[in-house]
Amino acid sequence: MDSLVLGIDIGASGIKGAIVNVHSGEMATERFKIATPKPSTPTKVASEIVEMKDHFNWNGPIGCGFPALVKHGVAMTAANIDKSWINTNVEQLFSDTTQTDVYVLNDADAAGMAEMSLVEIDKEGTVLFLTIGSGIGSALFTDGTLVPNTELGHLKFKGGVAEQYAADSVRKEQKLSWEDWAKRFDEYMHHLDLLFSPDRIILGGGSSKYFDDFSKWFTVNTTVVPATLLNNAGIIGAACYAGTKHHSK
């Protein structure tokens, strides 16, 4: 049982979870998904975490990827979730509500950590992991070590912030073709290349499964690849993070 952890990925539109074998990185159950409540207040989301725990009849540690800058378990921002989360101790709230140990980190950091630790890729130099969904999440690694809470989707860009210009939600809302959206995302990656000179950019999140439909329009001068774990990376990474934290207590 020690190798199993419940991993949960909280997104703007859905909350996904599965029990994960943190030694192999494989999901031991089918993924279960609940719609993110609207408004996505702490009380409402916490109740969905309890529903997720009950669905799996789970009493062990839980890892949770959360869509905010998270420091020592506390949400410092709330770009894609209700503003009432700011300054909320997410770890404490979820642990109290579920009556078990819950460990929380930024959702993109969780997904990036899964990809970097479980997939055979070149980890040397600077690797930038981007999740494309309702917003744009980021995880930055130098020689395999995470620089936490980068939140590069919130960079000032094109008169607003980057995710308001190039997130997948913008593609859907504005009914952009793959070509038109890909050219926007390519502009964003050029900006990141100017700032960080990454050796590799890995694209994850819900849109990563359509990589072949849009990557042909990328011109950024660095290697861009789809995430191997696709949209399960957040669940797996959150579980692995919790497994490490729980066993180091």
Image: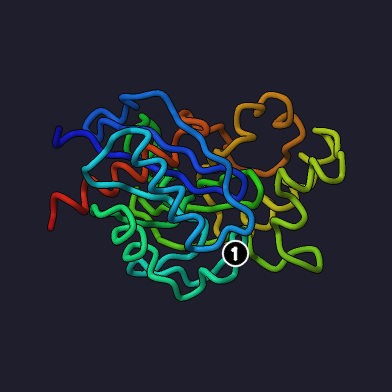
Q: Judge left or right: residue 81 versus residue 98.
A: right
- Residue at 70 percent of width and 59 percent of height: 162
Q: Judge left or right: residue 72 versus residue 49.
A: left
Vertical placement of residue 185 versus 230, above or below: below
Q: Judge left or right: residue 93 versus residue 127.
A: left
Viewer-closest of 124 and 171? 171
User: Residue 237: x, y in percent?
Assistant: 37, 42
Quarter of the image containing the N terminus?
top left
Locate residue 57: give its quadrant.
top left
**Which residue, given by chain and number where applicable, does mark 1 sit on?**
82
User: Residue 201: x, y in percent?
Assistant: 55, 43
Please state the total of marks drawn on the protein image.
Answer: 1
- Residue at 21 percent of width and 53 percent of height: 245
Viewer-closest of 201 and 45? 45
Quarter of the image containing the C terminus?
bottom left
Locate residue 84: give its quadrant.
bottom right
User: Residue 122: x, y in percent?
Assistant: 39, 36
Vertical placement of residue 80 versus 34, above or below: below
- Residue at 81 percent of width and 68 percent of height: 159
Classed neighbour count for the residue bearing mark 1: other residues with Cα under 10 Å, few (<14), some (14–19), many (≥20): some
Amino acid on which the number 1 mark rests in the picture: Asp
* Callout 1 secondary element: loop
Viewer-closest of 20 and 189? 20
User: Residue 206: x, y in percent?
Assistant: 60, 36
Locate residue 83: give its quadrant.
bottom right
- Residue at 37 percent of width and 31 percent of height: 119
